[in-house]
Amino acid sequence: MPRPAHHLLVPPRRHVVITLTLAALLLLGACQGAGDDAGQATRATQATRAAKSTATTADGAATTTTRAAATTREPTGEPVTIAFGGDVHFEGAIGSRLAANPATTFGPIAGVLRRADLAVVNLETAITERGSPAGKDFTFRAPPSALTALKEDVATMANNHGLDFGPVGLRDSLAAVKAARFPVVGIGRDADEAYRAYQTTVKGQRIAVIGATQVLDSSLAAAWTAGDGKPGMASAYQEARLLAAVKAARASADTVIVDLHWGRELANCPIDRQRALAPKLVAAGADVVVGSHAHILLGGGYLRGAYVDYGLGNFVFYARGGPTAQSGVLLLTLRGRAVTTSRWVPAVISGGIPIPLQGPPATQAVASWQSLRRCTGLSAKP
C-alpha cells in the first residue's frame, strides 16, 4: 500500500489547509476492553484503510466544519477513532525483533493500532547509530528501521530520551524521519518546527497532533530545548509557545491533540505540574491531551468537555512484570471537537511486546484502569 503524503501544519494566513489522510476500519469487539486478534490485520484491512483515507463528499469536496461548529463540542462530521499508546523503544528483545522483521516488531497489538483510523505513540529513543551518549543513567537508540516498525502511526519524540545521543543523534533522527516521510512531532531544526502540529485529514475531519515534553533532566534542559535557529525538542516549560501552537492548530483543525511526556516515574496519580497544564491546554483549544513517562498507568477522563489521560504507561518497552508491564491502547472516537466514546484495550507486556488481554482478565484490567481516575479530578462522562 503506498504511503499517503503528509505535512506539518503551518499557522495559516487565510484558514486554508492542504491535507492528505490516514484512516482505517475499526473492527474491535463490542465488549469493553476486549483484546484484538492480530491475525485479523490483513492486507484487505489495510486496503480498506487506504480507501477510507481518501473519502470525500458526493461533490468531491472534503467535509469541513463551520467556524461556529469548531468553537463548540457538539458532534460534527464523521466519527474518527484514534488509538493512543505510551512509551516505545527498541532495546533488548525488542531490538532483536526489529532486526528480524521490522514489520512484525509490534506483535499482536499492531492489529489494535491499525484498525483505528489513526494511531499515536511516544517514540522514546534517538534514531541514530552514531553520537556519544548523554551523561545519564539510561540512554536509548534505534536504527532507522524502527520507523518501518512504526509505519502508519504518528509519533512524538519530545521526551527525555529523544536527544540521548546529542546533536549528532538529533541530526540523524531528523534525517531518518525525512527519508522515511514519517510523521513525527515534538522535535525539529528549530522551535517553529518542533512546536508545529502534524495535520492529516481522516474522513473529512482535519486532525492536528502536537508533541511536547514536561520531563527534562535539569542539566540537559537548555541544550535539548529547541529555540530560534536552534535544533531540539518542544518543551512544555516554554508554556506560552506551547499554548500558541495549540491555538494556531485550533484555527484550522477540527480536532486538536496534544501528546505530552509528563508526570513522575512510578507515581500513579498526576502531579501538580500535570494538573496545572492540562486545563490551560484545553482552554487554548485542545480536544485531547494524553501522555506518558511514569512507566505505569494513570487515570483518564473528561475535563471541561475535552479528554485527558495522565499516563498511558509503557507500550513497546522492556518491563519486568508488575505495574510496569500493565499496558494497553486508549481508543477515542471523535466527531470534530466532541469525544463521543472512550475505551481502554488492556494488555500485558511480555518480551517487550504488549499482548492484548481477553475474557475475565481483560474485564478485570479495565476495572483496575477505571479506578485510577479517582485521584485525577477527571470525569467518566463529558
Image: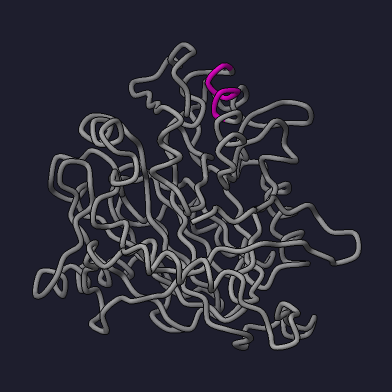
Quarter-of-image position of residue 134: top left
**Residue 17 versus residue 261: which sits nearer the camera?**
17
On the question of residue 108 being in view, the answer is: yes
Residue at the image point whose x is 53% and y is 21% from the top: 169
Q: Is residue 20 above or below residue 34?
A: above
Left or right: where 196 falls relative to 174: right
Q: Which secondary structure type mostly characterizes the magenta part of the structure? A: helix
In this view of the protein, can residue 314 be seen by the observer?
A: no
Residue 39 pos. (x, y %)? 22, 63
Q: Magenta stretch: residue 377 in it?
A: no
Residue projecting furthest to the right: 14
Relative image position of residue 84 (x, y in whole percent) = 42, 60
At 57% from the left and 56% from the top, the residue drawn is 277
Residue 14 left/right relative to 265? right
Residue shown at 72%/85% (left/top)? 69
Left or right: residue 207 versus residue 143 is right
In the image, the segment drawn in magenta is 168-173
- Total tally of numbered discs in the picture: 0
Coordinates of residue 247 in the picture (x, y in percent): 74, 61
Q: Quadrant of residue 364?
A: bottom left
Judged from this view, the residue extending furthest toward the left is 360
Front position in the image: 49 or 138: 49
Q: How is the image coloured?
A: one colour
Residue at image position (55%, 63%) is: 22
